[in-house]
Amino acid sequence: MIDFQNGVFVKLGPSDPTPIAAELAPILVEGERVHLSFKGMRDSVVFTNKRLIAINVQGLTGKKRDYSSLPYSKIQAWSIETAGRFDFDAELELWFSGLGKVRLDFKGQVDIRTIGKLIGNYVL
């Protein structure tokens, strides 16, 4: 499990969800679909219609991966912060029951409102 208390996923930018959906196919449940995917230097974050999946690439070759599943049903609250004139990054903070706060930082071109709406659709 990724240690969300001591780190954040930073500088995530949009990525094509097709290859990541193929990678995740063996762990997706029936009826689960990938909606959005974002990639950092090595790590990725995927939003499906049921959960957020954080992918932590490990080791020198990157073949070892940790998949952390964060179901929307465990979200107690969330906050979005849009990019500004001098602060080009957007932020998403999620508070999960039993886990605490998870923070994701996105590059400025990400429409954080769309992510907030997606979460709202599945949580509320």
Image: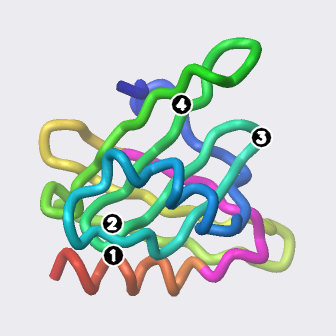
Front position among marks 4 and 1: 1
- In the drawing, what numbered circle is on residue 41? 3
Q: Is residue 46 magenta?
A: no
Q: Secondary structure at mark 3?
A: loop
Q: Position of residue 72 (x, y in %)?
A: 22, 63
CA gap between label 3 and label 2 equals 25 Å
Residue 19, above or below 97: below
Q: What's the residue type where badge 4 is placed?
A: Gly
Q: Secondary structure at mark 2?
A: strand
Front position among marks 1 and 2: 1
Q: What's the residue type where badge 2 is placed?
A: Trp
Residue drawn at x 41%, y 25% as measured from the top left: 3
Q: What's the residue type where badge 3 is placed?
A: Met
Circle 4 is placed at which residue position? 7
Circle 2 is placed at which residue position? 78
Q: N-terminal of the two: label 3 or label 2?
A: 3
Q: What's the residue type where badge 1 is placed?
A: Ile
Q: Is residue 103 magenta?
A: yes
Residues 70 and 86: in front is 70
Circle 1 is placed at which residue position? 119
